[in-house]
Amino acid sequence: MTIPKSVISVHTGAFLANEIEKVVFEGVIDSNGKEHENDAQPYYLAGVGSVAFQGNKIKEIVLKDSLAKYNFAPSNNPQKGDSVFDNQNPGTFTIEVGEEYKRPIKITNGSKNQSIGVMEGFKENGTPVLIDESSYFNKNEEGKYIAIKPGTLEGQCMFYDMIDKKFRILGISYFTYKIVPKTKVFNVTFVNGDDNNYASVRVKEGKSIADKSVAGQAMPTDPKKKGYTFKAWSTDQTGKDKNKIFTNATEVKNDMTVYAIYSLNAMVLNQAPTLTLQNKTITEGDTLDLKSLIVSATDAEDHDLKDKVQVVNTSGFDTTKPGAYTVTFKVTDSGMASVTKSATVDVKKKQPPKPKPEPTPAPIPTPKPKPEPTPAPIPTPKPKPEPTLAPIPAPKPQQEPKTLRRETPVEQEKTENREQPLLQSKPLHEKLPKTGASSMGVLLLSALGFFMAGFVSVGDRQKKNESKLPK
């Protein structure tokens, strides 16, 4: 039970014989807790009368303030039996030979400056003796009392303090201490599937784990198995024998091995992951991270599994050796469903660099031929009208023919020179001889030569013009 800080009085015998095992005092009233404004001092927890908690089974008392501040009913005579926590009877304590003595009442004081004294001992053969003098206990190097032989002892423990140099009894506890021979301790080994040592618990002979016969020992937590529900522990590995179920209340008589028994859950189809890969082509000497072949890896239950994909076979992949390599990947989900797929890496042989082609010169444009100028038409010369012949004068009487002689070359040249003027355009009367029939013949020949020369000249000009015309 807890006594709040606001309580300032507990009457005599207030909690007499109530089977109380633990009492907690929250503290005394501080300066802010005066009941009346004219109070000179705050109220202490006062009036905790004698035998207020007498006749209980108190094993623990907690004082959250200094013990000196608590105004317990004074008692300085253990024979009176009127202290606040007097006449406690926590029952029988059982320990084994070799175990440590434990006090029947534990008192926790909130102040380190206020100490609590303890006197404890037993009746041995009807004579009270302190524990230091008991033949049943020895004090070890740590200051603990260890039982050295079996037996049943009636014990007494008195708690006290000093207030203003006055002895004050807080309480007296009477109890029975039973020391038994050291019992055997057995191991209970818990097996969970492939785990042959899931847990190990030590239990004294004839005790159960629930008895806590060995300090710090307890049942292990229930194990788990994916897809199954834990049912129980059993000494029957199959779990079929219901009489071999093991619980924390099962009596342990020897070393034991117990097994985890499961029931199969309703099966939910675990779909295998989906793995998507891509093929790649590289050139000899290029670098390639094989994980780059992984496009995605997804699972209906576990979602993205791309980071879980593993390369299981590279087929000797070597970027320095041309060829086609098959790379195999595998991914497994949490339900152990897996998928395996392969991708291909084609390593192409590195080709020597091609020479740069000579630049193609810009084409030189072909000049368009200039058209030949069309020659102006050559006018056909109009024939010159024949000259009107002057009347031929009547011939004069012929002279006597001269004796003819052959002309010398010099004379022929002179004659030819004299005949050249006939080709010039002179008046006809200047070209004709003036006398004789021979003059008439000469005149006719001259006229004929003139016309022939004119025709030859016209013919030459026509041939030249025809050669210039396009063919």
Image (cartoon, rainbow, N blue to C red):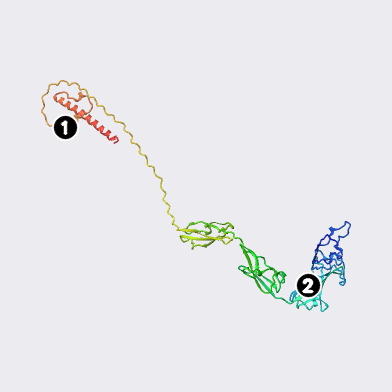
Residue 109 visible? The answer is: no
Callout 1–callout 2 Cβ contact below 8 Å: no
The answer to which quarter of the image holds residue 187 is: bottom right
Classify residue 435 as left or right of residue 297.
left
Quadrant assignment, res 338: bottom right
Coordinates of residue 189 in the picture (x, y in percent): 65, 71
Residue 397, compared with residue 164, is above or below; it is above
Residue 132 in sight here: yes
Tell whether 92 sits left or right of 400. Answer: right
Query: Which amino acid, mark 2?
Result: Thr
Judged left or right of residue 177, residue 298 is left
> Which one is in front in this view, the residue at disc 1 or the one at disc 2?
2
Which residue carries the number 1 mark? 412
Quarter holding the C terminus is top left
Say which residue appears at 64% left-offset and 64% top-offset.
Answer: 230
Which of 319/192 is in front? 192
Density class for disc 2 (Cα within 10 Å; few <14, some 14-19, many ≥20) is some
Q: Position of residue 18 (x, y in %)?
A: 82, 66
Disc 2 designates what residue? 92
Question: In this view of the protein, which residue sits in the foreground, 418 or 288?
Answer: 288
> Distance of mark 1 from mark 2, alpha carbons?
196 Å
Question: Three-letter amino acid code at disc 1?
Answer: Gln
Pinpoint residue 30: horizontal percent, then vertical percent: 83, 60
Query: How many marks can you see?
Result: 2
Residue 301 drawn at (x, y percent): 59, 57
Q: Quadrant of residue 242?
A: bottom right
* In this view, 274 is above or below 418: below
Q: As rendered, which of 276 and 254 lies closer to the eye?
A: 254
Answer left or right for 209 relative to 83: left
Image quarter hosting the N terminus: bottom right
